[in-house]
Image (cartoon, helix red, strand yellow):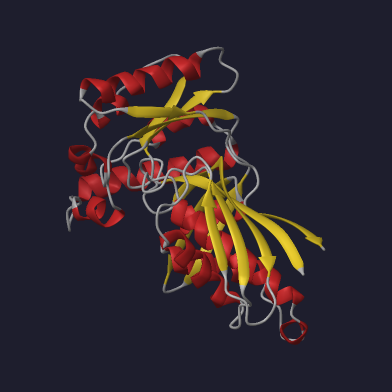
Amino acid sequence: MTRFTVSAPASSANLGAGFDAVALALELRMTARVRVLPPGAVPVWSYGGECAPTHDAIRTCIETAARRMIADVPPLEVALDNAIPLGAGLGSSAAAYALGAAIGDRLRAADRDASRESALGRDDRARVVAELEGHPDNALAAWHGGAIVAALGDDGLTYARFAPPELDAVVAVPELTLATADARALMPETYTREDAVHNVQRAALLGAALASGRVDLLRAAVRDRLHQPYRAEAVPGLEEMLALDDPELVAVALSGAGPSVLALVRAGAGGAHRRIGAALEAIFRRHGIRSRILTPALASHGVTIASART
């Protein structure tokens, strides 16, 4: 029987002005321990971890992606351990699709008949994850790790990956529910030219800052007029958080579609991450919302696979 373990990181997308284009991978992982069962066996799934799924939506994502990689997925025993908060704007579905694509790719490589077919290239596998997820920023951060600037459309998938900036992450995860579809519904259909130009300028600056390691540019680069002002009504306290000021604070942004909020802090800045985390938590508390503070590292690696045979 074949056993292997696959993991994928969380991600924080948009980073303000980089709407649907920019993301950072976070070292909170969704991990699947996989065992291939004999033909005809009944698949077995179990869920665990700090953020264990309470229904099969994550399983559906994983199975869908696996089938995109290999049509005949054998019966599997999957023990899923999840540390990514679900429905919180931290890329849990992207991690699930990345896990599924990696599982399917591993099974394809082990299948004698499939191995004679032309193998999918690195970018082909990344494209599968991006197409299934629908958001190339989250998808590629989960697949590749690091900092991602990506575009997906009629001209295909184009992206650049950079090493993550040397910063600490602080994430405030409130006890709120905000579906991505509902968050998008808050945004207008049209924008003024002034707002469009504002975001184009800052999105370009954001990409340049990540590419060059100029973290001093991030505070200006994350300022957004396309989605955060409209989603603020569904995330009480967001405007106050975006306006936070601290000498060690580099940038604050809504994480993905929300409701989580990401703060980037100068690395090794003493107790700054605790101080800023406490400030974010206090703002939510003033609005009657409980939250928890996470301090994950920025993830240098995306999907990882470790295999063994028994």
Quarter of the image for residue 75 reads bottom right
The image shows a total of numbered marks equal to: 0
Decide which of 293, 25 is in the foreground and name it: 293
Q: Is residue 194 above or below residue 280?
A: below
Q: Nearer the viewer, residue 76 or 239?
A: 76
Residue 241 appears left or right of 157: left
Say whether residue 306 is left or right of residue 78.
right
Snapshot quadrant of residue 232: top left
Residue 274 visible to the viewer: yes
Residue 151 placement, left or right of 142: left
- Horizontal side, residue 225 vs residue 110: left or right: left
Q: Where residue 37 appears, x then y in whole percent?
A: 68, 72
Q: Position of residue 297 (x, y in %)?
A: 58, 33
Q: Residue at x 58, y 35 (%)?
A: 213
Residue extending furthest front?
Answer: 41
**Residue displayed at 39% across by 54% down:** 20
**Which residue is nearer to you in this view: 168 or 213?**
168
